[in-house]
Amino acid sequence: MARVGRRLARHALPLLRKAWPVYGLGDWLPAHQLRPAGGSRAFDSYGSDPHFRLAHTVSAGWYMVEMKLRLPSAWADAKIYLDTGAGESEALALPMRVRTERMSKRLIHLPAAARLRFDPLSAPGRIDVQHFRLVKVRAGFARKRMNEKLATNHPLYAHRAAAAGTALADAELWADYCKLFEAGSELVPYEDWIAHRERSRVPGRAAQHAAISGWTWTPTLSVVVPTYDTDAAMLRACLDSVLAQGYPHWELCIADDASTKPHVREILTEYMRRDTRIKVDFRTSNGHIVEASNSALALASGEFVALLDHDDVLPSHALFTVAQALQDRPTAQLLYSDEDKLDKEGRRCSPYFKPDFAPDLLYSQNYFSHLGVYRRELVEAIGGFRAGYEGSQDYDLALRCVARIKDCRDIVHIPQVLYHWRMAEGSTASGQEQKSYTTEAARRALQDHFDSGNQPVTVSVIAPGLYRQHWAIPEQAPQVSLIIPTRDCHDLLKTCVDSILQYTSYGNYEILIVDNGSTCPSTLAYMAELDAAGKARVLRYDLPFNYAAINNFAAQHARGSIIGLVNNDIEVIGAEWLTEMVSHAVRAEIGCVGAKLYYPNDTIQHGGVICGIGGVAGHSHKYQPRDADGYFSRMRIVHNTSAVTAAVLLLRREVFEQVGGLDEVELHVAFNDVDLCLKVMKAGYRNLWTPFAELYHHESVSRGTDEAPEKRARFQREVAVMQARWPDVLARDPYYNPNLTLQREDYSLEVETET
């Protein structure tokens, strides 16, 4: 049915054009900065971003814009500016992502007669305008088109439409439709996620009690709270949130650190009288956060301790959900949940949906934070909180506990928001810069963690709350074999190899070029020149193209103890890229190491792979600006991922051989790198991505697109292989979060749709 709908839509526009204005390529005037470049439709821009202006004022209404451009990179973020009389502005700019030499379409709406400007690139460059047309369409057609597009791409849309019972208003349709074209937009607002996903899943008090009655083990949870001069309303809200818990087997252990404000003692005394499960130690001298936390910890008698700040709030199902998780993993030593913040008006905001246990992410930021629940015996065994780490005492506690936990399955992530972190003035929730001393305390806690394990690591600060580990490379630096498959593509290959030779500071590597049937004289001459000069070895592979087989073949001829898979359309831009990747690849616990790749227009092409995106896998943060922080700073820090792209991938030869290399039987072209990474992860290694290895990726220029029928059929077969082979990880990537969408690569929220 969907296919029929698309077919009808394709035929609808020609019919509409008989009655409505059509503005073709000749109606768009290139700006004076654009100069003809080898053809009437090819232009170079000089000194500024290229743009075109429509020669006519266009009447109000709905329009479909369609274009096909040859771009200097695989993608571009184009914009159409409207001037309805007050001039052009970003507020009236309509974004449109354009793929080179592919037809792109989107609706635009003019609230009044307007003049239009089209900016195909965000930087100077050459473009070839192959097709450009603006067609006026009827409102009914526009509404139908928006409904179809949203039903396919917007995770909340079907639910909204069903709930409304009727078609949504044009304004709401238009707002949701526009979000589909905005890179990094908040497609699903957090309040919508709360209303349509969380609310229906939160168990009521009766449901909690019914579940608890069936448990044979109801562990006592000791909620540990240090206080000092807490605002009265915030303190009451904190205490009330514990009293409101549906799980009854708790105790509240409070240490007041000699508050100077009398209302603190009055409130705590009042609450002690209200509930015998509340214990308070009124300290006689102020000892700061560590001493106060240890005093509160000394009151605890439960099997587990939960850390709660004196001005924060627990949802009423928090402790029940923790106890429920313990039923599934009774040997758990440490549990943590997702969290959000409360703004100054008490509204929930800034949710952090976290991955399952990811050590390298933990080394980069304290993502455990809240809600953190620890087995009391473990906390006591390490001596509780440590003096000297004030401000990051919880990070230090987590690191020392993790070092003691032998089975990582005993570190349990609960993918639910079980903690509301108040953004009070001066709190860490308002930003790490509010308590700058915490950053240095955290750095020292990390350094101590590695020093105590005799690991050759130096910790540095990237920014408040973000840290980097510099892992030492063995004195005898291992040889890396960089495998580069190619067929012709002289310019790409030369850019790739020359950039490696020119910019790579790491010394011990070899380049293996695998020639898959090149016939181009310049390519053959270039490879012969490299081979003769000893700058690269050229291997011949004359069988039909099979990416997996080509790389497996080359790996058998590699001399290095580390295998590096490199596409021929890669360009090195940072001297330390290989040093950084090797420093992780030599770690015994690490498998595949991936790099940060950019399109030539300086947008992100690869920030790690998320399994399940689009049915199999997608690249994290794709198309976001090069300097984007990413989801909770992901694009600035080393972190674990289930997979990374083989466009630039390093791993030890022993690991490559252990898992059987790339699958050259069933995954000739697509997903063999994801499959390799998942095999490596299954074998017990961690894969990771680093932003400190930066390269350009001129993606798939050398092979073209997969539009031919035989290529589409092959691709679908490879999709089916992956879905049959890895159903669990494609359904729930452990380094992602089930509350985030699998429809986009930007960490948008997921909302289940209803039919």
Image (cartoon, helix red, strand yellow):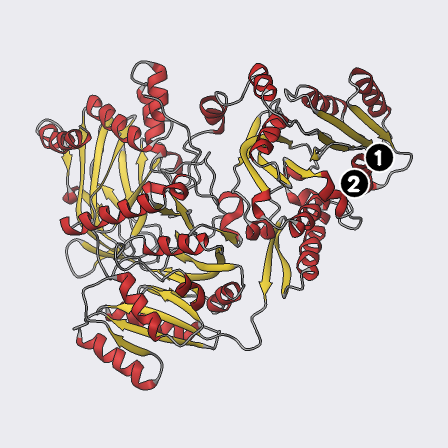
SS of the residue under disc 2: helix
Q: Residues within 10 Å of mark 1 (few under 14, many from 20)?
A: many
Q: Residue furthest bottom?
A: 532
Vertical order, 616 against 249 (above or below): below
Location of residue 286 in the rendering, given as x and y in whole percent from the top left corner: 87, 38
Q: Is residue 222 visible?
A: yes
Please identify the quarter of the rendering in which residue 287 is found.
Answer: top right
In the picture, the quarter occupied by the N terminus is top left
Q: Nearer the viewer, residue 206 or 513?
A: 206
Location of residue 203 in the rendering, given as x and y in whole percent from the top left corner: 54, 20
Who comes first in sequence, dot 1 or dot 2?
1
Residue highlighted by disc 2? 289
Q: Which mark is residue 144?
A: none
Kindly identify the residue that appears in the image at 31 percent across and 66 percent down: 551
Residue type at mark 2 is Ile
Cβ atoms at labels 1 and 2 below 8 Å apart? yes
Kindly identify the residue that appears in the image at 63 percent across and 59 percent down: 460
Vertical order, 513 against 320 (above or below): below
Please identify the quarter of the rendering in which residue 306 is found.
Answer: top right
Kindly identify the residue that appears in the image at 85 percent across and 24 percent down: 265
Location of residue 314 in the rendering, given as x and y in whole percent from the top left corner: 64, 27
Residue type at mark 1 is Asp
SS of the residue under disc 1: loop
Q: Report the side of 631 relative to 712 (left or right).
A: right
Location of residue 390 in the rendering, given as x and y in whole percent from the top left corner: 76, 46
Q: Residue furthest front?
A: 216
Residue highlighted by disc 1? 257
Q: Residues within 10 Å of mark 2 (few under 14, many from 20)?
A: many
Q: Is residue 341 visible?
A: no
Q: Nearer the viewer, residue 456 or 181?
A: 456
Vertical order, 320 against 744 (above or below): above
